[in-house]
């Protein structure tokens, strides 16, 4: 992206909100922000079964949290360090250039 050699980023997703935002594996939001920064279009391709009619925005989606133990070595626990370990993040519709499903 930095060298201008990327035209599109294409991702799948786990969930699509009715406003066009998505919830997907952690890191998707960061990649969408990076694409926007570099003027690269960000496309999400997913089946219509991923549309969540109960979630109008990303705020309506419960983000699964895993244990900090999965990412913190034991010596951090002794130092009383903590960590958040979300499985998903939310990418708002304003960062998505196109949503593509089997219906178009």
Image (cartoon, rainbow, N blue to C red):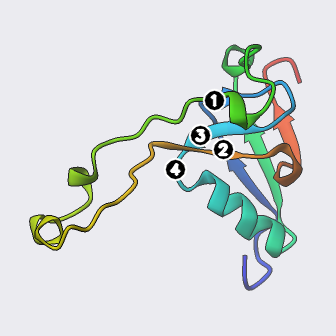
The disc placed on residue 90 is 2
Contact between marks 2 and 1 (CB within 8 A): the answer is yes
Q: Residues within 10 Å of mark 2 (few under 14, many from 20)?
A: many
Residue lying at 10% horizontally and 64% vertically, measured from the top left? 74
What whole-number distance in Å separates the C-alpha atoms at marks 4 and 2? 8 Å
Where in the figure is residue 18, as x and y percent of width and height?
Answer: 83, 24
Where in the figure is residue 23, as x and y percent of width and height?
Answer: 64, 37
Q: Which image quarter holds the C terminus?
A: top right
Direction from residue 33 to residue 13 in the image, left or right: left
- Classify 91 as above or below 58: below
Residue that numbered label 1 is attached to: 61
Q: Quadrant of residue 84?
A: bottom left
Residue that numbered label 4 is attached to: 26
7 or 97: nearer the viewer: 97
Contact between marks 3 and 2 (CB within 8 A): the answer is no
Lower sequence index among marks 2 and 1 = 1
Where in the figure is residue 30, as x and y percent of width and height?
Answer: 64, 62
Q: Residues within 10 Å of mark 1 (few under 14, many from 20)?
A: some
**Secondary structure state at the residue bearing disc 4:** loop
Q: Which image quarter holds the N terminus?
A: bottom right
Direction from residue 44 to residue 41 in the image, left or right: right
The disc placed on residue 24 is 3
Query: For the residues carrying marks 1 and 3, which lies nearer the camera in this image?
Result: 1
């Amino acid at each position: 992206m930095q060298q201008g050699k990327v035209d599109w980023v294409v991702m799948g997703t786990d969930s699509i909100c009715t406003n066009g935002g998505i919830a997907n594996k952690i890191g998707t939001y960061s990649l969408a922000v990076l694409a926007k920064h570099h003027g690269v279009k960000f496309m999400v391709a997913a089946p219509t079964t991923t549309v969540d009619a109960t979630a109008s925005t990303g705020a309506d989606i419960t983000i699964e949290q895993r244990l900090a133990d999965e990412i913190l070595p034991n010596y951090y626990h002794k130092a009383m360090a903590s960590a958040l370990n979300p499985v998903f993040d939310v990418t708002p519709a304003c960062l998505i250039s196109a949503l593509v499903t089997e219906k178009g």
